[in-house]
Image: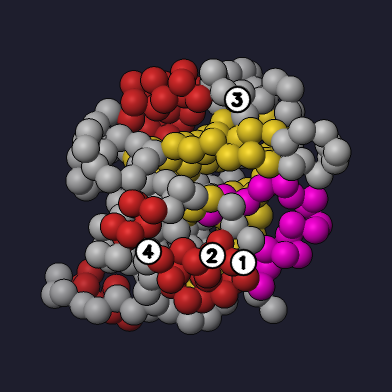
Amino acid sequence: MKLLFIGDIVGQPGRRAVAELLPRLRREHQLDFAIANGENSAGGSGITPKTAGEIFDAGVDVITCGDHLWDQKEVMELLANEQRFLRPLNYPLGTPGRGSGIFEVQSLKAKGQSPVSIAVLNAQGRTFMQPPLDNPFPAAAEEVKKLRERTSIIFVDFHAEATSEKIALARYLDGRVSAVVGTHTHVQTADEQIFPGGTAFLSDAGFTGPHESVLGREIEPVIKRFLTNMPQRFEVAKNRVLLHGAVIDIDDATGKALKIQRVAEAVD
Ligand SMILES: [Fe+2]
Ligand SMILES: [Fe+2]
């Protein structure tokens, strides 16, 4: 099966990029499934049922999140009711919502055959990240063990700052999951590869939104903040809107990755 992972969707421009580009990407890459990180989809900070609805309507099957989880209070509704919305797994016990899910997919290649199950897992790093969560290494390993009883096709969005933590978690899970793709830095890395155990990896998928910006925000206030330390309003920028992510081809029978390819597409 072939899936597209879309890096952090930033604000209205990011949502528009997904709506405009995903149908074509689905056709061109013969995609079976699409996953997107939506933590910045509401005005650059957090996610609401409305922005999540727009992303699902655009053709995304599952939305993951990250440290911006709590920025909009309406997220509680998603955490309570939306099975296709995942938050980082390693929040303390008792946190609403869930960190993984299993979804049924009718693979395009295997038309007429029974649907394939794909598990999606969202976890958050701890190095240079707030708030400090539970250790994602044992949390992810334990969850993967449970998921593997149901399917060997497992995608992990690891929302983390440090490249070392991302590579280490992916190496740790190599052979146990199909892919680990990083999010959070909003900068797409060029280190896509498949590890010896069959796990596809990319340190960071990048972000989907306006790239004439600093990580999706207007440039001037960010510079001013660095110059003066004074608080600024960081509005979502407007121009050079790109969709960033990666397409991953997975062997249905073994769950091992066959190919990983970065995606960087501009809105016309
Ligand atoms: Fe983000
Ligand atoms: Fe983040």
The answer to which of marks 4 and 3 sits earlier in the sequence is: 4
Left or right of 113, for residue 76: left
Find numbered disc 4 in the image and state the secondary structure of the residue it sits on. loop
Q: Amino acid at mark 4?
A: Ile
- Residues tagged 2 and 1 counted as in contact (Cβ below 8 A): yes
Q: CA distance from mark 3 to mark 1?
A: 26 Å
Q: Which residue is mark 1?
A: 58
Answer few, some or many: residues within 10 Å of disc 3's Cα (few below 14, many 20 plus, some between 14 and 19).
many
Q: Between residues 170 and 163, which one lies in front from this camera angle?
A: 170
User: In the displayed structure, would residue 138 be above or below residue 59?
Assistant: above
Callout 2 secondary element: helix
The magenta span reads 20-36
- Please give the residue where the numbered disc 2 appears in the rendered image: 55
Mark 4 or 2 closer to N-term? 4
Residue at 39% over, 53% down: 81
For label 1, the SS is loop
Residue annotated with mark 3: 151
Question: What secondary structure is marked by label 3?
Answer: loop
Find the distance from the CA under tag 4 to the CA under tag 2.
Answer: 10 Å
Q: Position of residue 139 (x, y in %)?
A: 34, 26
Which residue is denoted by mark 4 in the rendering?
Answer: 47
Q: Would you call the spot at circle 1 few (<14 residues within 10 Å), some (14-19), or many (20 or more)?
A: some
